[in-house]
Each structure stands twice: as C-alpha cells, then as structure tokens.
Image (spheres, rainbow, N blue to C red):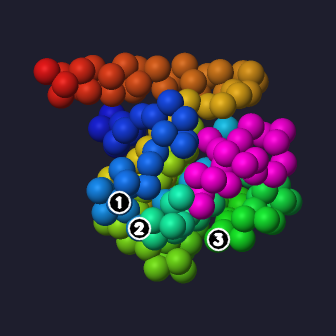
C-alpha cells in the first residue's frame, strides 16, 4: 500500500519540471492540480511564470490538463486566459471522473504524468488511474486547518520513505 502513495519524483516547484524531462519519460499529457501546486488559493489567475512554463510544455508537444477538486468558478477564472482543458470538482483521488477526463482528452496511463501537492489526492489519483509518473511539489502556501495539518502529518512517513529510497538509489 505504501508504494501506491510514493511519488515518482519530488520537485521544489512546478517549473523545475522541464519539458525535456517529461519528454524523456514519454509524457504527452500532464494532468495538473491548480491550488497550491501552480498558484496559492487566493491567486485567481495565472501569473507570467505559470504562463511561461505552460507555454514551454505546449511547445514541446505536452498537453496540460487542469484537474482540481475546487469548484467551477475558481477553475474557470484561473483557466480563462489559458484556454486549457480544465476540470473542476474532480473528486480526487476517485477514479471514475478522472478516468472519464483521461479518455475524453485521448490520454493513456502510459503517456501521462500527474502533478500535485498532496499525496492523498494527487499521487493517489495517479496511481488509481495506473499512471506511474506521479510528480509532487511542496504546497506553495498550505492551509492551516486541522484537516490539512492532519493530512500533512500523515504524509510525513511517506515522504521519509521516498527520501530513504532515493538516497539508496544515489549510492
């Protein structure tokens, strides 16, 4: 079970993930969370940094699909000037809606990667869909509610296991 929760790779921030890196893994579709992955909750629209990164992916032939558990108004506003395929209320880590989304954009588990800031929603979503390449970034600005603090506490042993495995690989 723990292996199902381990990310494929952890990056410091979303734009550390280069188009070349994704292409080298055979990624043609990147399913990305929005809140706390690309922008903090209170930032309504993408800034130039986000736009530049998304443009570089597009130029490399990588299709980005926004998938969020947030509501439609938030995701519509964020995506308004981007024009990406964007889906709200995705019910991550559930498989049904995300599977429908994958099918509708023509993606397969083999040519896709999943990016997010949470193990129990984003990494688990990838695994539930059969996507091996689950990429994780630390939350940009974490919520401090009891629920989120509990989730982050539950992520710690998984992150320790990831770091231990990757240290052993570096030897």
Identify residue for label 1: 23
Q: Is residue 105 visible?
A: yes
Q: Nearer the viewer, residue 41 or 89?
A: 41
Camera-nearest label, 2 or 1: 1
The furthest residue to the left: 171
Q: Distance between the Cα atoms at labels 2 and 3?
A: 14 Å
Q: Do we see residue 1 in this rendering? A: no
On screen, residue 106 above or below 125: below
Q: Dot 3 corresponds to which residue? A: 85
115 or 156, which lies in front? 115
Mark 2 vs mark 3: in front:
2
Q: Nearer the viewer, mark 3 or mark 1?
A: 1
Relative image position of residue 30 (x, y in whole percent): 49, 60
Question: Which element is circle 1 on?
Answer: helix
Tell me if mark 2 has few (under 14), some (14-19) or many (20+) residues whose alpha carbon lies within 10 angstroms of its own: many
Q: Which callout, 2 or 3, points at the residue further toward the start of the chain? A: 2
Who comes first in sequence, dot 3 or dot 1? 1
Circle 1 packing at 10 Å, graded few (<14), some (14-19), many (20+), is some
The residues bearing labels 3 and 1 have C-alpha atoms spaced at a distance of 20 Å
* Residue on which the image places disc 2: 28
SS state under label 2: loop
Query: Given contact means CB atoms under 8 Å apart, are the residues at marks 3 and 1 in contact?
Result: no
Q: Is residue 42 magenta?
A: yes
Residue at (66% x, 69% y) in the render? 84
Quarter of the N terminus within the rendering: top left
Which quadrant, please, contains the C terminus? top left
Q: How far from the left and from the top, in percent, is residue 143?
A: 73, 27
At 33% across and 27% down in the image, what residue appears?
A: 162
Task: State the CA–CA distance, disc 2 to disc 1.
Answer: 7 Å
Where does the image place residue 150, in percent across and percent down from the top left?
Answer: 61, 22
Residue stretch in magenta:
37-55
Which picture quadrant has residue 51? bottom right
């Amino acid at each position: 079970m723990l292996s199902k929760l381990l990310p494929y790779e952890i990056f410091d921030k979303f734009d550390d993930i280069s188009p070349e890196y994704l292409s080298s893994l055979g990624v043609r579709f990147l399913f990305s969370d929005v809140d706390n992955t690309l922008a903090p909750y209170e930032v309504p629209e993408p800034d130039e940094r986000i736009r530049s990164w998304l443009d570089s992916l597009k130029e490399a032939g990588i299709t980005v699909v926004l998938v969020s558990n947030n509501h439609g108004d938030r995701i519509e506003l964020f995506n308004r000037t981007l024009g990406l395929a964007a889906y709200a209320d995705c019910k991550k880590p559930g498989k049904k809606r995300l599977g429908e989304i994958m099918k509708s954009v023509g993606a397969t588990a083999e040519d896709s990667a999943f990016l997010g800031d949470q193990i129990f929603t984003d990494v688990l979503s990838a695994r539930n869909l059969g996507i091996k390449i689950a990429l994780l970034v630390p939350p940009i600005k974490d919520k401090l509610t009891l629920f989120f603090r509990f989730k982050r506490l539950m992520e710690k042993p998984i992150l320790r296991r990831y770091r231990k495995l990757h240290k052993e690989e570096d030897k």
